[in-house]
Image (spheres, rainbow, N blue to C red):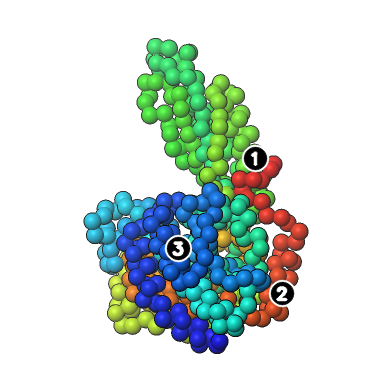
Amino acid sequence: MSKESLISKVQSVSQDLTDITLEMWRNPETALEEFKSSKLLSDYMKSQGFEIKSIPNNPTSFIAEFGSGKPILGILGEYDALPKLSQKVSAVREAADGKTLDDPGHGCGHNLLGCGGAGAAIAIKEAIEKGEVKGTIRFYGCAAEETLAGKGMMAREGVFDDCDACITWHPAFMNSLWGCSFLAMNSLKFRFKGLAAHAAAAPDAGRSALDAVELMDVGANYLREHVNEKVRIHYAITNGGGLPNTVPPDAEVWYYVRAPKRADVKATTARLIKIANGAAEMTETTMSYELLAGCYDVVSNHKIGDVMLENMRFVGGPGYDDADYAFAAELQKNLTPESKAATIKSYYAPEEIADMVLAEGVYDNNDYGQIMAGSTDVGDVSYICPTAQMIGATLPVGIGTHTWMATACTGSPIGVKSMIFMAKSLACTAYDLMTKPELLDAAKAEFKKSVGDFKYVSAWDEKE
Ligand SMILES: [Zn+2]
């Protein structure tokens, strides 16, 4: 089976993939609520002949598997949406039909991400059936990327442990790779409990949970000077007591800790917990905390990345038409020169694309060794097996994800064409990895060199 046949197979299911991705787009579901989206995709994969496996403690994640034995190639897909990004396919800000601006929307294009990966897995399944590829193809339906919890929750269950490699893609404004790392991160809520009392009549009888939160924040702000300078600590008070005339018996503060390496996140989190305990001691309140999510930095596999670029060039491009260009140009008018330049810079994108409307070509990435100032739970998988991510020109140049403009694109023909292009490119990359043992061996050798003997432990299972 040639790569041309893989491309034709993806093309033959492209209408199905389009229907599913647009159905998800019209019914956006946020992290861990993706019941309809995951069912839509897992039902479709089942109808295509995949065995569907559920994952313990992960009701909106699933595995669709076909084939047997080694190698085992994983394709990662997501489908969660973002809060408050409801948007029509329109170049002006307006909520989707029947929705308000407070409703969720697919501002990161995970509707496309998930369906593109599924399309690639379907093409590889056909190659396995024809006896031209040996091994197992696995599509991972991954919940909750946006809260950086999903893949860590799945990894806790060991579902990636026997994978030889994992590949994925993400919407962006050019066709290239994410060869960079991302910031490792922990998301924690600290809850304090005190004693309510009338704030004027009997303040001496009260113990303020809000005092504890404020003292914790002071402590955390002093901590900043004494951590690795790349560590970022952000917080928001999510329960400040509510009433000034009652000593607040309950208060809560939500922290993110980020750093280029997981070890710094872990160490800083341990110190933050000490500060929280100190604040509780000072105020005679009690403290509990909950780790909502935690993810690793990303070890990007260059061997696989090189093959991804080759395959994107082989497939060609998304093939946008005049109507796509016209819509993209209208959307770009919402950008200020500063915001456009900042977004382009954050991707280490080549200067030549700065004046383009849609960057249809395939560009070498300039981001090996760089760190993108965000986080992704793909990092967890990247510490378990060789992993690489390509990016597709789903958006006009300069438009970032997590914006209403991105929601508009991910429900438009621009998004759909990008998804089909990525599905074909992923299928060809999976084919290379499964049919060229020397390539997979080289990817594994690079992984071993990067990760050494480190044994992955999920953020929830890390010991101090
Ligand atoms: Zn995303």
Question: Dot 2: within a 10 Å radius of its alpha carbon, few (fewer than 14), some, or many (20 or more) residues?
Answer: some
Assign the N terminus to one quadrant of the image.
bottom right
Q: Which mark is residue 171?
A: none
Q: Which residue has dot 1 on it?
A: 270
Residue farthest toward the top in the current orientation of the protein:
201
> Farthest residue toward the left?
98
- Pick the front one: 396 or 299: 299
Residue sitting at x 31%, y 62%: 26
Q: Which residue is mark 2?
A: 441
Regarding mark 2 in the picture, which secondary structure is present there? helix
Alpha carbon distance from label 1 to label 3: 39 Å
**Sequence order check: which comes first, mark 2 or mark 3?**
3
Decide if residue 377 is on the left or right side of residue 96.
right
111 or 66: nearer the viewer: 66
Task: Classify 10 Å Cα crowding around label 3: few (below 14), some (14-19), many (20 and above).
Answer: many
Give the quadrant of the C terminus: top right
> Percent x, y for residue 309?
56, 79
Helix, strand, or loop for circle 1? helix
Residue type, mark 2 in image: Asp
Indicate the amino acid at tag 1. Answer: Ala
Alpha carbons under labels 2 and 3: distance apart: 31 Å
